[in-house]
Amino acid sequence: MRILLITAYYPPCDYGWGYMRVCEQVADGLHHLGHEIAILTSVYRHGEEFKPYPVYRSLHIDPDWVLRKPAAWQFFVGRKSRERQDSVHLHRVIDEMKPDVIFIWHAHGLSRAMLQEAEGLAGVKTVYYFANYLPEMPDEYVEYWRDVPQSLPIRLLKGALAKIALPILAREGKPIRLQYPHSISVSHYVRQRLLAQNLIAPDAVVIPNGVDLTIFKTTVPHPIANGDVLKCVVAGRVAEEKGIHTLLIAFGLLRQQRQLKQIHLNIIGDGPEAYKAKLIQMITEYDLHDFVSFQEPVSIQQMPEVYNQHDILFLPSEWHEPLSCTMLEGMASGLLVIGTTTGGSGEALFDEKTGLVSDAGDPQSLADKIVTALNNPHQVQTLAQAGRQEVNDRFNIQGSIERIEAYLLALVNGEGVD
């Protein structure tokens, strides 16, 4: 089977985060199973190319937030030319490879016109993998021009330009309505959410993203005794929707009640400066300097070591996580996960079975779960072991690759898919 994967970012690359990493694991796994693989991705590369299959780095991200040029400038200067170039790149790779399947993995920021052309190719199956809510998102520029800035001067300027830009997009037939003829969702939550809006076909399937258990694994756990400091971590994007502020409020409540002891939290990651400043202010306000530390982001390769240096992973997300890679990695590494079950997270995290569950945006609920962990060190280990077994049984990357292979083969062979 010849499979062309299209994705916004591909390793070695500093962008794309967990989505990119799972894409690479699936591509490597399918190649190992004997399939012909090629990758069509954006121009970004940070490091040496080392893959045994071709990686074409020619697509544009539009608008590209990495560039220093404002999105408005990118819209009016060269946008249509970039869109045409991406179409040319697509057809050039297709003519060279003649794929049986175009597997569109991470499409946010890629040309919708190019994706529409991919969907319309005769004799080629087009499959999307949804670990986000791409079908709900309008064309990136439509979203940009409709967004209203808080600053009055910028709002007035952007509003004037939007009166020009939005009619241009309308004349171009934007936003483009993609068909998403075949799709795999990362969780039942994502599939049901998209199906309820008639955005994907009813035969869409669920195949969770998996964890490479040869990389994310626990060392021999040391017993946690009463009096040991519980080492806790939050890892990933430091942003409002991740609910880290709720975690700090929970720490603050416990601090006021004199229940905050024998625990330390490391916040590892990066995000908007205004939000990070808010968190730093909260640490001062609640007198948490002895209990909370910030650390710079670390590479993907360093994350197994990070997990093995901690006992608890917090996942206080307040948005609908499709299915958190960080949560699954932490569970695989033998950490107790204390988190919310918004979105698809509740398909792996079960209260007092595979972890501890708090209510999203509720600091008292989260504080109660922290007290449970502080007062029951044996339960911390018991639940951590159950979480690790859950990932081993249901979220192993090898199992995900084999299910994806079976699904793609069934499509190519014209068989029904489950």
Image (cartoon, helix red, strand yellow):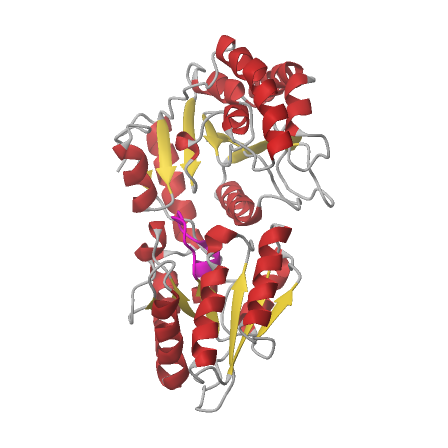
Can residue 58 be spotted in the picture?
A: no
Can you tell which quarter of the image residue 60 is in? Answer: top right
Image coords of residue 193 (percent x, y) = 30, 39
* Image point (37%, 37%), residue name: 184
Residue for point 55% across, 44% down: 20
Residue 324 is a magenta residue: yes
Front-most of 108 and 406?
A: 108
Left/right of residue 400 with respect to residue 326 in the rendered view = left
Taking the spot 63% from the left edge, 31% from the top edge, the residue there is 154
Quadrant of the image containing the C terminus: top left
Q: Is residue 362 left or right of residue 417?
A: right
Question: Image quarter for residue 294?
Answer: bottom right
Q: Is residue 217 above or below residue 326?
A: below
Give the percent coordinates (x, y) of residue 42.
63, 32
In the image, 229 versus 286, the foreground residue is 286
- From where the camera sits, is residue 383 visible? yes
Q: Position of residue 304 (x, y in %)?
A: 57, 65
Residue at the top extreme of this rendering = 171
Q: Is residue 153 above or below residue 336?
A: above
Query: Is 264 situated left or right of 60 in this image?
Result: left
Question: Does 181 sit above or below residue 317?
Answer: above
Residue 142: within the magenta? no
Q: Which residues are magenta?
A: 316-329
Above or below: residue 179 compared with residue 334: above
Magenta portion: prevailing SS class: loop
- Residue 61 at x, y percent in the picture: 62, 30
